[in-house]
Image (spheres, rainbow, N blue to C red):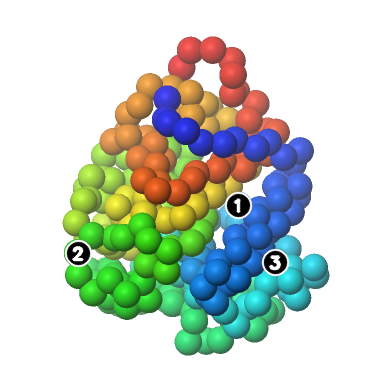
Amino acid sequence: MIGDRSVEVAADAAALAGRAAARFAEAAETAIAARGQFVVALSGGETPRGTYQRLAREPFASRVSWSRVQVLWGDERCVPPDHAGSNYRMAREALLDWVAVPPANVHRIRGEDDPGAAAAHYEATIRGLLHTPAGPPRTTAGARIDLVLLGLGEEGHTASLFPDSAAVRERVRWVSAEYAAGPAMWRVTLTPPVINAAAEVLFLVSGRAKAEILRRVLEGPDRPGELPAQVIAPSAGSVRWLVDRAAAAELGKGSA
Ligand code: 6PG
């Protein structure tokens, strides 16, 4: 069982997308009112597509001050930015092409480069954005990511932190590159220390195929090496699970 976290169950994938978009907008408004900027790390995979599409439409298109948003990604597959598997491409098509985020505020992971070089380049980008040229991630406002969106893989991975991978145990690097499963390819991912320094982490989980793994992650024994989603526990922030009824189908049914 992981520590304090909130779980909200939405009726279906469409309701989940609406709730996630609303939460994104609230977090953006709070950060922009306080500091003039909102730093968000987007998730890949398919689940957040509906959320991004909602954000691209009213009321969110006008409600969010998009010129004040700095866009990062939690992970990227090592493919070119126009590849169908690119997390950047998905977010661009669903959201970024439709709202006025200045191109200089869009910090994509360079999936077309050598994975190690892309990871090093991305770490330097994030350190610059968060004013932390050296040392561990900081949890002070303005020096941390405001919101990290994450998904959950059917075997318990999140971002590109896969079961039994070195990235799950990484304590020093902010970004790492690894050859990983599902589908097998090189990937670049934020590591646990930088995700866990964030102000807020929001997991989006949808569909019956995720029900068993969601139960294991939230209600089963703590096995973060095996279930990387369990490693996510912000040290000075919050974690919310926004799931739909199908994904929540196995929760609360007893021992894992
Ligand atoms: C990726 C991810 C990954 C994803 C989960 C869930 O690049 O694949 O960021 O961690 O969030 O695999 O993916 P779905 O939303 O497609 O189920």
Q: Residue furthest front?
A: 34
Q: Is residue 115 left or right of residue 101?
A: left
Looking at the image, is mark 1 or mark 3 earlier in the sequence?
1
Using the image, tell me which numbered label, if any, was put on residue 47: 1
State the residue position of label 3.
Answer: 55
Q: Is mark 1 within 8 Å of ligand 1?
A: yes
Residue at x 42% of width, y 56% of height: 198
Distance from the alpha carbon under mark 1 to that under mark 3: 14 Å
The amino acid marked with disc number 1 is Thr
Residue at x 26% of width, y 57% of height: 178
Looking at the image, is mark 1 or mark 2 earlier in the sequence?
1
Circles 1, 2 touching at the beta carbon (< 8 Å): no
Q: Is residue 171 visible?
A: yes
For discs 1 and 2, the disc positioned in front in the rendered view:
2
Question: How far from the left and from the top, in percent, is residue 71?
Answer: 50, 72
Q: Is residue 181 visible?
A: no
165 versus 51 height, above or below: above
Circles 1, 3 touching at the beta carbon (< 8 Å): no
For discs 2 and 3, the disc positioned in front in the rendered view:
2
Question: How far from the left and from the top, in percent, is residue 174?
Answer: 27, 61
Residue placed most toward the observer, 238 or 70: 238
Distance from the alpha carbon under mark 2 to that under mark 3: 34 Å
The amino acid marked with disc number 3 is Leu
The amino acid marked with disc number 2 is Gly
